[in-house]
Amino acid sequence: MISSEVPEHPCVSPVSNQVFERRLIEKYIAENGADPISGQPLSEEQLIDIKVSHPIRPKAPSATSIPAILKSLQDEWVICLSSRISCRPLDRSCLTLSTTLATLKPQAGLIAPQAALASQPAAVGAGGEAMEVSEQVGMTPEIIQKLQDKATVLTTERKKRGKTMPEDLVRAEDLSKYRQVASHAGLHSASIPGILSLDLCPTDTNKVLTGGADKNVVVFDRREEQIVATLKGHTKKVSSVIYHPAQSVVFSASPDSTIRVWSVTGGNCVQVIRAHEASVTGLSLHATGDYLLSSSEDQYWAFSDIQTGRVLTKVTDETAGCALTCAQFHPDGLIFGTGTADSQIKIWDLKERTNVANFPGHSGPVTSIAFSENGYYLATGAQDSSLKLWDLRKLKNFKTITLDNNYEVKSLVFDQSGTYLAVGGSDIRVYICKQWSEVLNFSDHSGLVTGVAFGEHAQFLASTGMDRSLKFYSL
């Protein structure tokens, strides 16, 4: 084997008849195109999966000394004790969401686990129900501290910015004059039409990323008007894409149940994250740039390390028993939202892995959610032809925008200043926040609009659609 670890996803190479961890052998094949034992040519498609029950991991070499074994036994005793307590909700203190989540105050009656008893507390639901957590690598104290430190920095930066708008931000009166200035239809296959997802690099919005029905991920340079890379590897359509803000790396998710990490410069897949057993429906990058949040039809959300491809934690709400349809991090990264197939929006505390609030009100599956950079607005869309705005401080819906009959909301995004909200679906609409009045409406796509995104300071707007085109709008 490539490593000394027990494989989580074992597979056999028909070339050498050896068993490998799929994640590692795929990485080796991507770099070398050959079997590591025999050296003969080997492709991902040739690998044969082995169906096994999840093995118990052996102790790491560092845990084989007597002091380490004693500490391990002590830790297991503490975890057993906390598990016993977590099954007795009446004996457990009702804890409110940490005051560090200044942007969110949980409603009365929400229960969080008694985290002091173990470094890995049992996950619980908004009503105190136990939720299944798959056996994963774990949220170590170091990771939790890293998340907290990043959130502290971001909250401080937001307070410094206050209500001051960027000087270069396009004004509403100018935004209302935008028109289509470019349209590109050659990024994805014409035989399987449809661009299903869109993202712009946050630090250089001229770098455009699209995912297609043709199973391909495409990186496009808006300024040069040319394709930079076409990334192939998914076995089904690409439903979500994300551009890393600081690295030449992009991410994609698909109904083939995988998340892929790609090198733009190398033009190849560098990691396959197998966090789910069904279609991956949502993808969001943590503010650290080191972790991915994903949601799936398998009813789980997962938190994964992009460097190792390892799933750190994976949680489902067993009481809900419903597919997740989308997922998005709050800008500070300590909480996130998921949408469900039964019209619920759930807010989660990442560190405690708890469901801290639920927002009912939509009917039909939730199709898109978006947090504003201001930290306290959440926009949601569902298959009920409506757009809802929620205040995370008061935990309530303060505005509902009723759209045309049979309007399909497919994409929601705030600009980086939190001044504008764009909606993509049956057409494209842009609203100015606070007034929530419409300042733009485009019907240039001949098919459903699947993605919308703002350029830096809203100096242009980008959109993708089932008509296979990528369009840009500006003055």
Image (cartoon, rainbow, N blue to C red):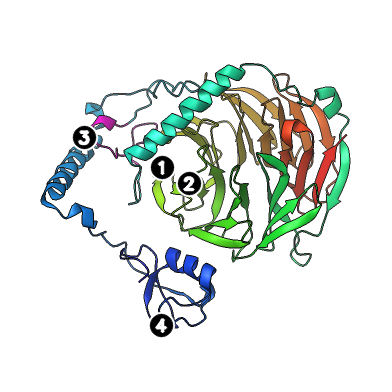
Q: Which residue is mark 3?
A: 85
Q: Position of residue 291 (x, y in %)?
A: 48, 45
Q: Are marks 1 and 4 in contact (CB under 8 Å)?
A: no
The CA span between labels 2 and 3 is: 27 Å
Magenta residues, start to end: 113-131
Asked if residue 189 is among those painted magenta in the image, a careful observer would answer no
Circle 1 or circle 4, nearest the eye: 4
Q: Nearer the viewer, residue 245 or 466?
A: 245
**Res 125 seen here:** no
Q: Earlier in the sequence, mark 1 or mark 3?
A: 3
**Res 296 seen here:** yes
Q: Position of residue 245 (x, y in %)?
A: 61, 42
Assign the N terminus to one quadrant of the image: bottom left
Q: Earlier in the sequence, mark 2 or mark 3?
A: 3
Circle 4 or circle 2, nearest the eye: 4
Q: Nearer the viewer, residue 247 or 137?
A: 247
With respect to residue 27, does 461 lie above or below? Answer: above
Q: Nearer the viewer, residue 159 or 236?
A: 159
Which element carries disc 2, helix, strand or loop? loop
Q: Earlier in the sequence, mark 4 or mark 2?
A: 4
| Circle 2 Cα neighbour tier, 10 Å, few/some/many (<14 / 14–19 / ≥20) | some
What kind of residue is marked 4? Ser
Q: Are marks 1 and 2 in contact (CB under 8 Å)?
A: yes
Q: Which residue is mark 4?
A: 16
What kind of residue is marked 3? Ile
With respect to residue 39, does 427 lie above or below? Answer: above
Q: Which residue is mark 2?
A: 322
Which element carries disc 3, helix, strand or loop? helix
